[in-house]
Image (cartoon, coloured by chain):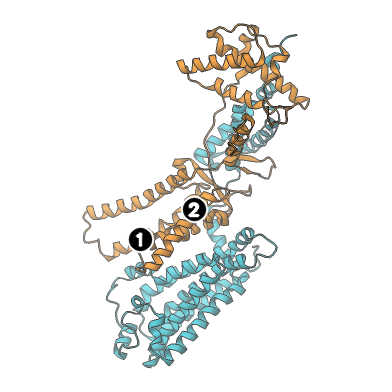
Amino acid sequence: MTNVGTTTDLRSVRFRREREAGWKRLEALVAQVERKGMRHLSFDEARELTSTYRQTINSLSVAREISLDHALLTYLENLAARAYLVIYAPQASIGSLITKLLVSGIPHAFRRSVPVLTIGFGLMIIGALIGFALVSGDSTWFYTFVPGELAGDRGPGASRAALETSLFGQDTLHQNALAAFAAYLISHNTQVAILCFALGVFWTLPTAFLTFYNGTILGAFVAVFAEKGLGYEVFGWLSIHGVTEISAICVAAAGGAQLGLAMLLPGEMTRKDALRVRGRDATKLLILAAIMLFAAGILEGFLRQLVQSTELRLLIGWGAGALWLCWLLFSGRGAKG
Amino acid sequence: MSRKPQKSAAEFNRDHLKREQKKMLLITPPEGVPLLFRRASLGARLGAQLLDLLITYGSLLLLAFLVTYLSWASWFSETTEALFAILAFLVRAPYYILTELVWNGRTIGKRIVKIRVISVNGRRLDPHQVVVRNLMKEAEVFLPIMLVIGVMTSSGWVKLAMAVWLLFVFAVPLFSRQNQRLGDMIAGTCVVEQPKIALAKELTERTHVATEKFVFEPHHLEHYGRFELQSLERILRDPARSQAAYDRDKEVARTIAKKIGFTDRIADMEASEFLSSFYGAQRASLESGQIFGDVREDKLHGKNGKSW
């Protein structure tokens, strides 16, 4: 007896010979799915896919124990990983995902987020009140709050007539409604909303500051108009898209606050886990904010300069607000989250 | 003054193994057998990202060029401009989210580079994860870049702050454990490579003919362990048939013969034959040892793997 068994007796060789057909079959099926998608599999093929996948996973775990053949092992690792990705692929179509998000996902997240929404809306309102009070008392405060490019010719020094034109006159810059809409998309408030959300990770502080600061800008603007006796008109002018748009900023801020609270008060979880858990609702709030900003863009682009009556502006603005609230409060009740 | 001690072979092997393991990511699917993925290199990810930018903005530019070139000049008004502004908005986060949803974690750029996003919890990639990692990309990278370039702001302080922020953002994947960027961490995802590996031939089947020529005694086969066997496997699987490969085989055969005390003459021509027949015998011996619990990781087995 010289040789330690002949090579054909190797357990690993027998192991491979017995299972190789199954692996090859799986490889072919996986390649087919990778090329054409799961939908092109027949019923039998789909069943075969899962059974050969289980066999291969089984082989892999045995091979890790017994096989000294590195090439075989890497092949099995690779095949198992590929098959895993084919089998654990998303099953819902894009359409049904979107429907689910709109019907139950977003409204549920909204209703779960009452505390942070209070933070978002609260800071905005407090900011607006303080801005209004300060500028009403001393109009030079205006320049402290409002950056020059945003103010345009609507500062405290402007005449009543000039202010009135800015409320009711035609916007000469954007004749075209679509152009106005596009300009809007990349405008100030969209950026503010994105920043309010993203910076929330830093313990909510930047979000709180930004939201509050935007509130003061808002308050300062209203104060300037109110001083000239245009308070009611400016309220209408702001309402038509502002109800939706400013709410969108507050919602984005609430999303940011979700992230910030995960950092501040992670509870029993690690901060990373807390971010992941709270991130689910935060993202939905951000998507909601994006939808609202989009809607506000349409309102601003098409309706603001078109609708000249303050009453109608108020009606459209707050009507839209009521519709948002109806959707968010009543949609998806009784459905599983 | 002490000189830095020379690395022993065992230490070298261990370090090598550690480095390799660092590049891998273990995912445990519900079946309970952990699967190994190789993390995508940062270069590949950057490449995929640049390709995606090229594809999205490239097609946008092409469209703009076509519109102007085909002399719809009258049409090229504020309306087209606005349309392009909206399209430019859509080729950002929405593009990445949609492609990664449709192709299960692969944008077009990632498909070309053959990398993909997977969920680290072993479940299927959740739409929520896709949305989060791409929205975060918007906030992490795109918005700061635009601000640094000077779109939307002219304040030097903002630009400076954003530049610092960008440095931080780009440093995160360099230092995080799984090379994740911030968005990946929050979403619980990781980008991995996915090459296709074909099943190589069974090496021992070739040794049928050679078994008679070289005969190994049990004491020949107790020197090496798994690590050396797999190094030999790599040499045997090397398809190169050059003079250099031939010389290497000769050298390796001579070293092995010396180590195991194999005294029969090995002709120069037979070096690779010797190697494959030794591979077969050594593997058989290690495997049968393994059945009885005698696992030999490398040639230092039974010596605590510490020193010679």
Task: Name the spot of residue B72 as percent of width and height, x first.
Answer: 23, 57
Snapshot quadrant of residue B156 = bottom left
Q: Chain of mark 1?
A: B
Relative height, residue A327 to residue A11 (above, below):
below
When the figure is inspected, residue B5 is found, relative to residue A213, above or below; the finding is: above
| Structural crowding at the residue carrying mark 2, measured as other residues with C-alpha within 10 Å and reported as few (<14), some (14–19) or many (≥20) | few
- Determine the residue positioned at 43% across, 49% down: B49
Q: Earlier in the sequence, mark 1 or mark 2?
A: 1
Residue B32 left/right relative to A111: right
Colour for chain A in the figure = cyan
Type of residue at label 1? Ile
Q: For marks 1 and 2, give the one nearer the viewer.
A: 2
Q: Which mark is residue A41?
A: none
- The chain carrying label 2 is B
Looking at the image, which residue sits at the far right?
Answer: B292
Q: Quadrant of residue A145?
A: bottom left
User: Badge 1: how crowded within 10 Å, few (<14), some, or many (20+)?
Assistant: some
**Residue B149 bears which disc, if any?**
1
- Where does residue A311 sit, x and y in percent of width and height? 42, 87
* Closer to the camera in the image, B276 or A184: B276
Task: State which chain is coloured orange.
Answer: B
**Which of the pair A144/A72 is nearer the observer?**
A144
Q: Which residue matches tag 2?
A: B171
Marks 1, 2 in one chain? yes
Q: Residue A97: tell me if it is visible.
A: yes
Q: Quadrant of the C terminus of chain A?
A: bottom right
Kindly identify the amino acid type of the residue bearing the numbered disc 2. Answer: Ala
The secondary structure type at the circle numbered 1 is helix
Place of residue B6 in the rendered image (x, y in percent of width and height, measured from the top left): 59, 32
Say which residue appears at 67% left-offset and 18% top-offset: B282
